[in-house]
Amino acid sequence: MQIKKIEDKSIIIINVPEATHQQKPIYLNNVLTNTYIRLNSADVKVNIEQLQILLRNRNLAQDVGLLKNYTIERDLDLLSIQKYRQHIFEHTHDTKYLDMDVSKFLIQMGALKLDYNDNKYYITEGGLLFFGKIDAIINRFPHFHLDYFDRRGNNARWSDRVASDDMSFLNLNLMNYFFLIMEKLQSTITDDFELEKNLIRKSPEKLLVILREALINMIVHADYYVSTSSIIVNVYSNYYEFNNPGMMLVSTEEFIKGGNSCPRNTVIMTLFRRLGLSERAGSGGPEIFDFAITNSFKQPQVETNFKETNIKIWKVDLVSTYPNLSKEAKLIFTYIDKNGKNKYTAKELKEELKLSKYVFQRAIKELSNTDLIVITGNGRGRAYSKSLTKLELYVGVQKLADRLRMGN
């Protein structure tokens, strides 16, 4: 508790930390349905689905449930298992995986788990989501849906789509979806790198790794019971968008800093790690932001709410996302952004960029109207600097702390 003086009045400030996911829901009078959540400035009583989400979020291993009425032969796609087995061999170069009995292979990979009550192995929920036939998956997860849209260009709708309810994609479980979407994403990088040299100026191979991290992040952190959103990947001309049902179980700051993964689906995460993917827990966020900083791209955007999480990964610099800016405005912003100083005077900018007073003032007005720059001071003391979001400020502080820790 703090007491501060504001205009001769004493103000009591009480900081109440947010409850952890394990502590939620918080409810009144020992009645579970008397649970409230904070939405903006209001406390709102939860509905049944929201209460179920809060209860599920207490468990950080949501896909370990055993499915005692499901069988390998009827409910899993054997072709998917065979494809995965081949990927495991290519990763490990161990021939034992090629000839191993299907049940034994799935046990070793973690898709089947032992029930100590009856000493039998059963398919896990994560195993079903990863290897299952689509009908069997939907029987257990009625809202399960996977989507992919290529929305580049001037097409009013989309130029390419993948959907789990499309008969063209038989048994589009999580494993098949992952490898198919990775092929699609790789083709978009190749297209852009060949056709638009201003996009992906550096390291298209690294961008593919970043997109892989985002795709895996989306799959392993999804809440497959939520009814209001689906797993969706959207490809636009300037950015990629990954959307999954379920709020992120770490804060945005923790996601950027890394080291604390908290995946909802530990079985699915294990199946990816067996392939040598996502080896380091919680490394995806830092890699995504480091890539943007290294390439001077617009900072990734992370939005999460009660029901879904959305991550945008840009492949152009910030000023390129404002196509209507004049070339002089872009020139000024790029100079401010790239040269490292916190503030610049009008004299510095006009002389360095060889701009007339009229052109300079017109360009500054454009940048101010789009909130790309901040103007401080008056007269000769007036200065111009780049606007920074709260997220960008945190990333900058985090990078400075990393450099200091490493002694650079």
Image (cartoon, grey):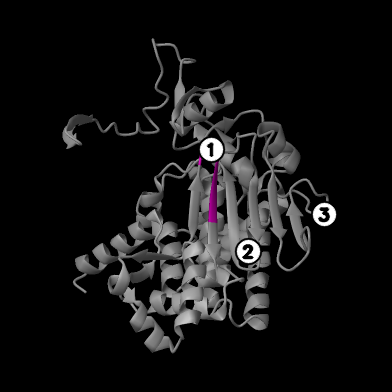
Alpha carbons under labels 3 and 1: distance apart: 27 Å
The residue identified by callout 2 is 182
Q: Is residue 1 visible?
A: no
Amino acid on which disc 2 is placed: Met
The residue identified by callout 3 is 168
Q: Quadrant of residue 235?
A: bottom right
The residue identified by callout 1 is 63
Q: Which of 392 and 382 is in front in this view?
A: 382
Asked if residue 49 is positioned above or below residue 121 in the image, the reply reads above
Residue 156 lies left or right of residue 106; in this view the side is: right
Rendered location of residue 128, percent (x, y): 63, 41
Residue 192 lies left or right of residue 60; in this view the side is: right
Amino acid on which disc 3 is placed: Ser
Rendered location of residue 126, percent (x, y): 57, 41
Q: Quadrant of residue 197?
A: bottom right
Alpha carbons under labels 3 and 2: distance apart: 18 Å
Which residue: 52% across, 24% down? Answer: 51
Q: Give the range drawn in magenta.
A: 305-311
Residue 253 lies left or right of residue 98; in this view the side is: left
Q: Quadrant of residue 337?
A: bottom left
Asked if residue 390 is positioned above or below residue 324 in the image, the reply reads above
Which residue: 74% across, 55% down? Answer: 162
Alpha carbons under labels 2 and 1: distance apart: 23 Å
Element marked by disc 2: helix
Q: Is residue 360 visible?
A: yes
Q: In which quadrant is the C terminus drawn?
A: bottom left
Residue 368 lies left or right of residue 135; in this view the side is: left
